[in-house]
Amino acid sequence: MAVVIVDESADRGETTKFLDEAFRIFFGQTGIRVRIEGWKTIRWQGSSRTELLRQLADEMQSYGRPFDIALAMYEMDPLDRLGFNLVGGWTGVIDDEYRKFIVVRRHRTRILVHELGHAFLFDHVHTGEVMDAFNVCAIGDRLCDNESVCFLDRDIREILRNKWRDFDAKPDLSVRQDLISGYAYCKTYLKLFFEVFAPPAPASAR
């Protein structure tokens, strides 16, 4: 069961279409059906991955009904969107405590399938196909080098092993970070160019 968290101004109809497509693809590969248990509105107080995940986790403490996954939609403001289109940035993230709090800031099916995978994959953070660590794209998250929504066979096997996991218990992770892990990331070719051709950092004075 999933609770969907959106801003008050969000178009729930468009959000539902986006979710239904991602849920359909995830179910087709894993047999795990994600159902929307309810909706909740939120007024975001931050913009970084850590701030959003913490606020989401705090908001869900007062939800009052059982749920497995809290799935939040965050809309970038115009300045954030400009920077994202120029150099890229994170597109989705899941917490590294319970692997049940997800924030997505781009309505891209691949991103949500990726984050749902992290809710059931604990042996490795990133592998390949839809679980690649990042995409290289022309503008923001458009015209990317990897548009796959498919899991590797090894990932499907692990997802099925963890199909009946308890979302109220912290999973046994191979690597546990402070708060966040398993985030989807897009970098533009412009950013990649500067990373490849940037001069090396000067050695620190001794």
Image: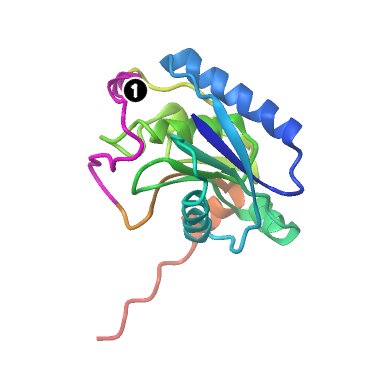
Q: Position of residue 96 (x, y in %)?
A: 35, 48
Q: Position of residue 18 (x, y in %)?
A: 66, 29
Does 32 sit left or right of 78 as displayed?
A: left
Residue depicted at 46% across the width and 32% down the height? 116
From this viewpoint, which residue is outermost toward the bottom? 206
The segment highlighted magenta reads 154-176
Residue 160 inside the magenta-drawn segment: yes
Question: Above or below — where is 155 with respect to 187?
Answer: above
Q: Position of residue 186 (x, y in %)?
A: 55, 45
Q: Is residue 43 visible?
A: yes
Residue depicted at 48% across the width and 19% down the height? 33
Question: Above or below — where is 121 with respect to 136?
Answer: above
Q: How is the image coloured?
A: rainbow
- Residue situated in front as seen by the camera: 146 or 193: 146
Q: Position of residue 100 (x, y in %)?
A: 42, 40
Q: Is residue 185 visible?
A: no
- Residue situated in front as seen by the camera: 5 or 26: 5
SS of the residue under disc 1:
loop
Residue depicted at 48% across the width and 53% down the height? 53
- Residue situated in front as seen by the camera: 69 or 186: 69
Mark 1 residue type:
Lys
Question: Above or below — where is 81 with respect to 165?
Answer: below
Q: Main secondary structure of the magenta part?
A: loop
Counting the numbered discs, the total is: 1
Name which quarter of the figure residue 206 lies in. Answer: bottom left
The residue carrying mark 1 is 163
Residue 79 inside the magenta-drawn segment: no
Name which quarter of the figure residue 137 lies in. Answer: top right
Label 1 crowd bin: few (<14), some (14–19), many (20+), radius 10 Å: some
From this viewpoint, which residue is outermost toward the front? 64
